[in-house]
Amino acid sequence: MRGTARYRSGSRDPGRGGGWTALGPAATLHRMEPGGDRNRTLTQLRRGALPNCVLAVLANGERYGFELIGVLSEARGLAISEGTIYPLLSRLRREGLVETSWRESDSGPPRRYYRLTPDGERALASFREAWRSYRDAVDALLATGGRG
Amino acid sequence: MMATGRVLIDGYLQRLAAATADLPPEVRDDLLTDVRTHLLEVQLRAASDVEVREALDRLGAPEAIAAEARGGPGAPTASGAAGAPPPSGAGWAAPPPPASGAGRTAAPSPARTTSSLGYDATALLTLLFGGLLIGLLTGVIGMVLGWTAGVGLVWASRTWSGGEKALATLVWPGGYLLPLLLGLTGSQVCTSTEATDASGAVVFEEVCEGFALPVWLGIPLLVVLVAAPVVVAWLLLRRGDARRAAEHT
């Protein structure tokens, strides 16, 4: 799952070409205003789910920060504020769920790559399971009000 | 073309440096490195200053990033000056951060606003039963000390507001000591004697001493005396749980 050569070649780099520009304004619309979200429940829900979304992206292969944020921003419903991903990544690293390594890039500054540790994989697996049953229960109750 | 973009990025990084001055050095350096690297990638790709501005917008306010690094939005700043927004009008071109190292304070952990469930439960149990239990073992002074310890513990908790603490304190001064005392003073001692009257029938004479509340008043009063402290303690514990859950990131 390393895929180093792939990234170095830049072939999967989302920032290449028109990707960055296309992503910009749309993502801005969905950006969460700092401290301005009136729906506290949704905010809490997003905060709880986001670290696991990061783990899920990394389960698909290592990414560097800028690239990872690009992937997360494309999932519009997540409503992330991009800058807050870095403190989150730092926390995941301190918790031993991800690990990092710096590598040179052909096209730009050195990049810090993040990848899942075995602990991270376990954490993701247990969240996946818990989330499914939670989501199903909420969906069922929202749909039927318990009279299904 | 990119001269303004460069200035915007530098200003942003300086604001972030200022907003994170109170973080532990290793956390702060890590964060600044990550965001600086991110902005280098932005610079590399941005075709115009507009795109740089958009990228900075998506990153969000440096203060919001700093708040997240402290443990989430709404977390209080450890040092008022460090977390304060830049001087008005400065915008992106905020004044340079303090010289490396000068602005750093010794690694304050984010201030929590709740105490643990274990602590809160201990405080409430001591409030309710401390006077009673210690009093039974050691006498009157123990009664006062036990209850006072409970009050102290409750007031030292970070979980509850002043009003809630006052409520807990006022439930029954002395915790369950008061109902017990009322029970003692309100008890009746009745003695009955058996006698035979003139017709040969057996009659009982009952003589009661002491004071007793009528049953219609006594039983509800007893229920309130016993139930109210438990209900208040339960409510406070539940509120504490909700607050801990809200604080958990």
Image (cartoon, rainbow, N blue to C red):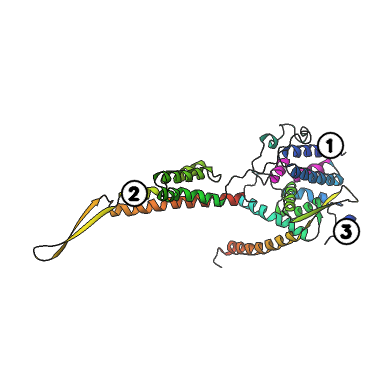
User: Of residues A10 and B150, which is closer to you in this image?
Assistant: B150
Find disc 3 in the rendering and name its residue.
A6
Quarter of image, res A125: bottom right
Residues beneath discs 1 and 3 located on the same chain: no
Return the residue found at the far front: B138
Return the residue found at the far bottom: A148
Question: Disc 3 residue type?
Answer: Arg
User: Of residues A41 and A110, which is closer to you in this image?
Assistant: A110
Instruction: Tell me the CA gap for discs 1 and 3.
Output: 34 Å
Which disc number belongs to residue B182?
2
Question: Disc 2 residue type?
Answer: Leu
Which disc number belongs to residue B208?
none
Q: Position of residue A73 (x, y in %)?
A: 75, 52
Task: Say which quadrant the N terminus of chain B sits in.
Answer: top right
Q: Residues within 10 Å of mark 1 (few under 14, many from 20)?
A: some
Question: Disc 1 residue type?
Answer: Thr
Residue at 78 percent of width and 39 percent of height: B13
Magenta region:
B49-71
Q: Position of residue A42 (x, y in %)?
A: 63, 52
* Residue B44 visible somewhere in the drawing: yes
Instruction: Tell me the CA gap for discs 2 and 1.
Output: 80 Å
In which chain is the residue bearing label 1?
A: B
* Residue A77 visible somewhere in the drawing: no
Find disc 1 in the rendering and name its residue.
B4
Q: Say if mark 1 contacts mark 3, CB within 8 Å.
A: no
Left or right: residue B211 versus residue B125 is: left
